[in-house]
């Protein structure tokens, strides 16, 4: 039995074992015994010339080896500090990721002890300078350190695990003026050399683009992986059009640089073997300069494997190389198998090898080969018939141009060849992009809930532009050429215009993850469609391709209803940190979202790198198969409530947007513009009589009809709702403070509520004894940030709640909090526990 890609099945078996161990726990010793017995059986079968049994036993042995690898890997135990979170203390350590200066802060990674690192943000007062902190600088700083913390919602990204794999366990903030440099020379000398090259490159870009923040930030991220000066707003169009991969340091960057470097060496008459060796060394150097990012490491490893094979005159089969590199990486670190970057990198190359390469070989490759020296007719007889015919046609076309337009023969042949190469290149980009779009559709939807429709044409412009930008950018750095730097900036603007135009007609769809059975059907059909072992499988492949198309259509359309409890009322406080976001599901199935969290910018021009609406609230809603909201309500205009609303409006297109007394502010103007662009009506709500909505009774208690808002948003602007379903009631207060509470109590407007959304994150300015006594709730829900700097919730408020035997649940301690009512009884769940 001879396989064209012999490493594919061994990798699949090992990966299957690692995946099985992810969901089922096995004792290590029996697994090792089973693997050993299968190896012995394989040897016996080999000696008996029973090839099929040998093959089967070897694959099963690898499966058990994968289970053993995963089981034997000890879990990461986070180290502990001797001081509580957010307590000022003096820290000392070694800078292991050099400082990068953004608009208003300096960021770097410091190693406090071997394998224990913290991400540090230094702030400076106006007029103060940030210190220069290259790799290997030993520093001492006064600051506050807190453990990394996840948003504890279904669908949320596990940032704690992600950073722990990089040995980062804390976030620290400090004053730049109080940092002391104790010396230099700590760390690894090789890393110090590599990071010195990186720092020099970043400094050169700063000087070349002093007055062009966009080009500087984009090139620092694209060439060197430094994202400190990259504004998220600049990348949104790239994300929506499926061209974001061009910006991210990836294997394609290594391939472009390697091709240019190898071409340069070859024209300098460097022999083939040494040229390949030097190119591989350059790839590994680039991996270090970009901070040893995983995609670049994988690409450098693949290039090394390919180069070694070529030195021994072995044919470089793409799928075999991909499988070999993946096999090495999962043996070293089995957890990489579940990393989105790992999956997307290898799936992209695998799809190209399994689908794009065969299609191109059957279509454009013969014509591409025929373009070499078309004037030399003697080469025709040495080429396939299709290539030879194409060469003859091109020569005839060139002759026609010469006779009709009077062009010189050489110029006519160049024009014909150039046009043909351009069309063939566009075809290759189209085919490759198409199969990547289809092959990566499932992980893109599962991880990012996106599927681009304009990527086929957008990539045809963006990919060539960045293929030129990458080598030209490094050439500008090396030569300090302002002309080349200007050319890079011009290409960046061309790419920017192209993606902006494509984004303007890109469908604004976001897709929840599909059910497991549908995802499994899609994957199985895709694998069957890739089979090429036997010509008789052509019908099976056609059937599989049809299933792929049908399954992909179902995944994109997502005809599955939201996962809500019909006939019941649900209030869910989403863990958005220091902010508010409440999902309300009504008995009829109607959905309302009240606020969408946000991170206050405190007047800074640069917004935070995380969008709570996009990165926290939306993934939770998608995890419940929600595509559309009936109502989005904004309690008031503070950023920790309104900051994520724009993303929610774009992602879920609500039928109505409710507001209270929302005063004019930059955030509110932005929300109004988004709602207007999406044709979402804005309804201002004031105190009214109870009305029926979604099978429940809703009443707006505040703001009152005569309420006069201040010139800036305040807590008392809050939209306050009272909702009743059957014999149960809920009071949703926003950030309402004492003044409005007193008015509602005095006016007799407050009724009993079983569940109270405690106002203003449990602050002492809200939830007065009078309100608590008037409402008399059984449960209190506090939406509050983990270890927040505001001191929320106040001990005064907590004491008042405890005195009245109110059962309090907090998002900082319990994560997601859900209360479900059937009209008679309440069921409370926190972070998956009932």
Image (spheres, rainbow, N blue to C red):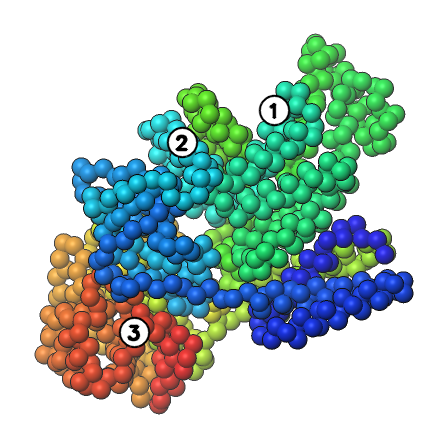
Tell me which residue sits at (69%, 11%) in the image.
Answer: 407
Q: Estimate the x, y position of residue 508 in percent, counting from the top left.
A: 47, 53
Q: Nearer the viewer, mark 3 or mark 1?
A: 1
Q: Label for residue 805?
A: none
Looking at the rendered image, the disc whose residue lies closer to the viewer, 3 or 2, is 2
Q: Quadrant of residue 702?
A: bottom left
Q: Nearer the viewer, residue 274 or 325?
A: 274
Instruction: Name the spot of residue 470 as percent of width and height, x first.
Output: 51, 32
Q: Which residue is mark 1?
A: 264
**Which residue has dot 2 on it?**
200
Residue at horizontal 53%, vertical 64%?
513
Question: Is 372 located above or below residue 548 in the figure?
Answer: above
Give the vertical position of 595 relative to 316 (above or below): below
Of callouts 2 and 1, which one flags the residue occurring earlier in the amino acid sequence? 2
Q: Are marks 3 and 2 in contact (CB under 8 Å)?
A: no
Element under disc 3? strand
């Amino acid at each position: 039995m001879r396989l064209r890609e012999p490493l594919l099945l061994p990798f699949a078996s090992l990966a299957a074992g690692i995946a099985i161990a992810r969901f089922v726990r096995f004792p290590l010793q029996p697994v090792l015994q089973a693997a050993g017995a299968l190896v012995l059986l394989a040897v016996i079968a080999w000696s008996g010339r029973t090839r099929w049994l040998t093959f089967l036993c070897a694959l099963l042995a690898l499966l058990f080896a994968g289970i053993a690898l995963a089981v034997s890997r000890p879990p990461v135990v986070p180290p502990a500090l001797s001081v509580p979170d957010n307590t000022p203390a003096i820290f000392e350590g070694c800078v292991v990721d050099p400082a990068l200066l953004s608009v208003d802060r300096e960021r770097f990674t410091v190693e406090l002890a071997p394998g224990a690192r913290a991400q540090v943000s230094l702030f400076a007062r106006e007029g103060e300078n940030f210190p220069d902190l290259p790799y290997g600088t030993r520093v001492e700083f006064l600051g506050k350190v807190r453990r990394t913390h996840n948003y504890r919602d279904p669908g949320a990204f596990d940032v704690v695990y992600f950073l722990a794999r990089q040995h980062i366990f804390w976030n620290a903030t400090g004053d730049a003026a109080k940092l002391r440099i104790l010396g230099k020379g700590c760390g690894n000398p090789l890393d110090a050399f590599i990071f010195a090259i990186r720092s020099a490159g970043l400094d050169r870009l700063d000087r070349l683009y002093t007055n062009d923040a966009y080009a500087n930030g984009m090139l620092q991220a694209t060439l060197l992986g430094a994202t400190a000066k990259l504004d998220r707003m600049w990348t949104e169009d790239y994300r929506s059009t499926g061209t974001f991969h061009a910006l991210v340091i990836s294997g394609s960057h290594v391939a472009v640089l390697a091709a240019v470097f190898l071409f340069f060496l070859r024209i300098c008459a460097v022999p083939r073997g040494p040229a390949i060796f030097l190119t591989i060394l350059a790839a590994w150097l680039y991996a270090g300069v970009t901070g040893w990012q995983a995609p670049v490491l994988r690409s450098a490893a693949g290039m090394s494997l390919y180069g070694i094979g070529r030195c021994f005159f072995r044919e470089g089969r793409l799928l075999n190389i991909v499988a070999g590199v993946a096999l090495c990486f999962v043996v070293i670190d089995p957890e990489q198998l579940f990393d989105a970057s790992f999956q997307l990198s290898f799936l992209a190359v695998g799809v190209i090898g399994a689908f794009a390469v065969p299609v191109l070989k059957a279509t454009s490759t013969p014509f591409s080969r025929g373009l070499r020296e078309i004037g030399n007719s003697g080469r025709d007889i040495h080429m396939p018939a299709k290539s030879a015919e194409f060469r003859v046609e091109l020569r005839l076309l060139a002759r026609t141009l010469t006779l009709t337009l009077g062009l010189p023969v050489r110029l006519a042949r160049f024009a014909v060849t150039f046009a043909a190469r351009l069309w063939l290149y566009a075809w290759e980009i189209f085919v490759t992009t198409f199969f990547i779009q289809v092959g990566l559709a499932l992980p893109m939807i599962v991880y990012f809930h996106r599927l681009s429709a304009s990527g086929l044409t957008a990539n045809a412009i963006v990919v060539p532009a960045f293929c030129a930008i990458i080598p030209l950018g490094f050439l500008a750095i090396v030569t300090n050429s302002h002309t080349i730097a200007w050319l890079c900036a011009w290409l960046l603007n061309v790419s920017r215009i192209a993606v902006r135009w494509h984004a303007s007609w890109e469908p604004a769809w976001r897709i929840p993850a599909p059910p497991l059975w549908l995802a499994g059907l899609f994957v199985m059909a895709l694998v069957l469609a890739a089979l090429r072992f036997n010509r008789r499988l052509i019908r099976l492949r056609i059937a599989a391709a049809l299933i792929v198309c049908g399954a992909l259509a179902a995944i994109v359309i997502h005809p599955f209803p939201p996962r809500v409890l019909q006939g019941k009322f649900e209030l869910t406080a989403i863990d958005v940190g220091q902010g508010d976001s409440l999902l309300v599901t009504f008995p009829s199935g109607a959905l309302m979202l009240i606020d969408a969290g946000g991170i206050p910018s405190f007047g800074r021009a640069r917004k935070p790198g995380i969008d709570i609406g996009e990165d926290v609230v939306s993934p939770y809603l998608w995890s419940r198969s929600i595509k559309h909201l009936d109502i989005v309500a904004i309690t008031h205009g503070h950023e920790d409530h309104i900051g994520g609303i724009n993303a929610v409006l774009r992602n879920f297109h609500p039928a109505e947007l409710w507001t209270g007394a929302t005063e004019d502010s930059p955030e509110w103007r932005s929300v109004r513009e988004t709602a207007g662009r999406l044709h979402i009506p804005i309804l201002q709500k004031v105190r009214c009589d109870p009305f029926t909505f979604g099978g429940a009774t809703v009443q707006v208690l505040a703001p009152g009809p005569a309420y006069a808002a201040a010139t800036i948003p305040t807590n008392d602007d809050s939209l306050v709702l009272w909702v009743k379903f059957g014999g149960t009631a809920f009071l949703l207060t926003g950030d309402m403070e004492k003044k409005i509470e007193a008015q509602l109590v005095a006016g007799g407007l407050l009724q009993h509520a079983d569940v109270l959304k405690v106002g203003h994150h449990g602050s002492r300015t809200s939830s007065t004894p009078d309100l608590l006594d008037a409402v008399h709730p059984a449960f209190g829900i506090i939406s509050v940030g983990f270890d927040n700097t505001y001191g929320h919730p106040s001990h005064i408020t907590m004491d008042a709640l405890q005195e009245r035997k109110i059962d309090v649940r907090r998002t900082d301690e319990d994560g997601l909090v859900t209360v479900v009512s059937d009209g008679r009884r309440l069921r409370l769940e926190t972070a998956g526990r009932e």
